[in-house]
Structure formats: structure tokens, C-alpha cells
Amino acid sequence: MDKKIYLKELKRLQIELVTLQQWVQHHGLKLVVLFEGRDAAGKGGAIKRISEKLNPRVCRIAALPAPSDREQTQWYFQRYVSHLPANGEIVLFDRSWYNRAGVEQVMNFCSDEEYEEFLRSCPEFERMLLRSGIILLKYWFSVSDEEQERRFLERLNDPLKRWKFSPMDLQSRSRWQLYSEAKDRMFAHTDTRHSPWYVIDSDDKKKARLNCIRHLLSQIEYQPIATAPIELPALDSRGYIRAPLDQQNWVEDHYGDDNE
């Protein structure tokens, strides 16, 4: 996708996201968006573009680490419930409770009984969220095996992206078919009428980000919030004399005109 076209459309959509944020705040809505998919599918990039122009006090990202020993003894959904939004908040889950239906099941991090119980209880859990007034959107980023391989190689060869590649990525690559089976079974149980999955073709990252944002905006009826014009007040002129600036520890300017 042409970069100029992408950036122009992204800016337009991010302005709409700011309008949506104001609507969520004004009406006390509670919005939860889940981002799932294979490793290197582009979830993180989409989350970044959605959140980067929004108020972090309104829009939070929940990217939970592996559960602690204590959390492993809790009700499975408990650690996620604490990250759900209050009125006027948006929470973007960078992976979510669906870990159990994906990586935990494929990597044998949970028992068969725990996995089967998740498939039974997840639709009910999501009904509870909806009944409580939460707006729940679920996105699956779909990437081909060829594109995933290209992105993995890019991570390995780019020092700015090397940190993104983990031993788990190797496991996910070698277990491609198992992940496919897990995803299909997860959809069979949790792609419901009241809480459907929305699939994003993410082989082209730029298109995936734009399509995801457009769809998200289309799922909520919102309007611009009228605000009164703001005028900046005049500076306080009490005659205070500030301390000399040369007494402060200034960081050296390495990029001034003399250093070009």
C-alpha cells in the first residue's frame, strides 16, 4: 500500500478515534477490544496505531505476562477481570483470556480438563460482560505461513526488532498445524451471535491496521461532542524574576545549526 495514502487515511481514522474517545467518556461507555492471532500477525502494530493519539488515562493497553504461581490457582478469568474498564474507559487486550484456547492448549500449559472447561465457560463469561454493559469486540489477525516466515526473518536480522523474537516464536512456527486446529476449534465454540469474531487479513500490515480501525469505528454509534471555544488566559504579570538560566544543568545540544 502506498505510504502517503496510508498515512493520510490513518490520520483521518485517528481523528475519528479521538471523537469516539470523547463519546465514550461523555456517555460513560465501557469498551473492550481483544486482539488475537498468530505470532507476528500484526496485532501490536494495530494496537499502537489505535492508542497512540488517545488519552492513556482513557485508553489502556492490557498485555499480561505469564500468570504467577498464585494466579494459576485462581479462577481462570480472574486475572483478566481486574483489567476491565470502568465507565468512560477503553481497554485494548494484546492477547486475552483466549490464551487458554491457543498457546496454553498447544504448548500443554494447561490440562485437557482446563481446556475443555474454558470452551464451555468462555461464551457464558462473555455474555456476563455484555449484560454488565461492556461493549466487546474480538479481532483475529490472520497471517499466512509465508508472511509469518518473512516477518520472523526480519526480526532476526533487524537489531531494532530482535527483541520481538522469542523462543515461543520458534515453537509456534514448528507447530503451525496445531495452532490452526486450535484456532478452528476455538472459533467453533466462541464465534457466537452475541460475541462474534472479526477476522482481519494481516498479510499487508498497513491495510490490516486501517481495516481494523474502520471496522471498530463502525461498531459504535458515536457523534462529535460539542465543546465550548477555549481562550488562553494572559500570562501572570506579578513581576517575578526567575533565576538565571545559566545556573541550570543544560543537556548539550548535539543537533543545533553548528553541528549539522
Image (tube, helix red, strand yellow):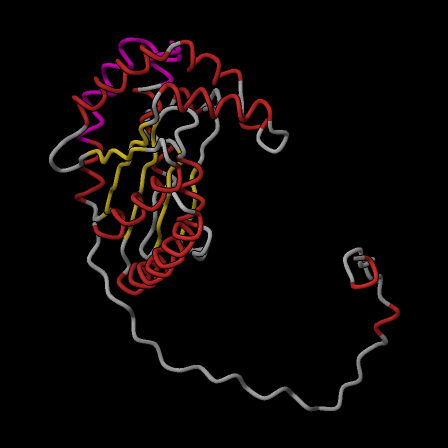
How far across and down, in percent of the image, does residue 27 sit?
26, 62
The boundaries of the magenta stretch are 103-124
How far across and down, in percent of the image, does residue 244 sit?
86, 76
> In the displayed image of the protein, which residue is found farthest to the left?
193
Identify which residue is drawn at 32% across, 37% down. Answer: 34
Q: Is residue 201 above or below residue 109?
A: below
Tell me which secondary structure the magenta stretch mostly adopts. helix
Q: Is residue 201 above or below residue 255?
A: above
User: Is residue 118 on the magenta stretch?
Assistant: yes
Left or right relative to 69: residue 139: left
Where is residue 99, by image quadrant?
A: top left
Give the tally of numbered discs: 0
Left or right relative to 30: residue 67: right
User: Is residue 128 on the magenta stretch?
Assistant: no
Identify which residue is drawn at 60% across, 29% down. Answer: 158
| Quadrant location, the C terminus | bottom right
Where is residue 172, by image quadrant?
A: top left
Q: Is residue 45 above or below residue 16?
A: above
Left or right relative to 257: residue 80: left
Identify which residue is drawn at 23% across, 17% down. Answer: 117
Q: Nearer the viewer, residue 202 or 163?
A: 202
How far across and down, in percent of the image, does residue 236 sit?
65, 87
Identify which residue is drawn at 19% across, 58% down. Answer: 221
How far across and down, in percent of the image, does residue 98 sit?
31, 26
Q: Nearer the viewer, residue 168 or 258?
A: 258
| Quadrant location, the N terminus | top left
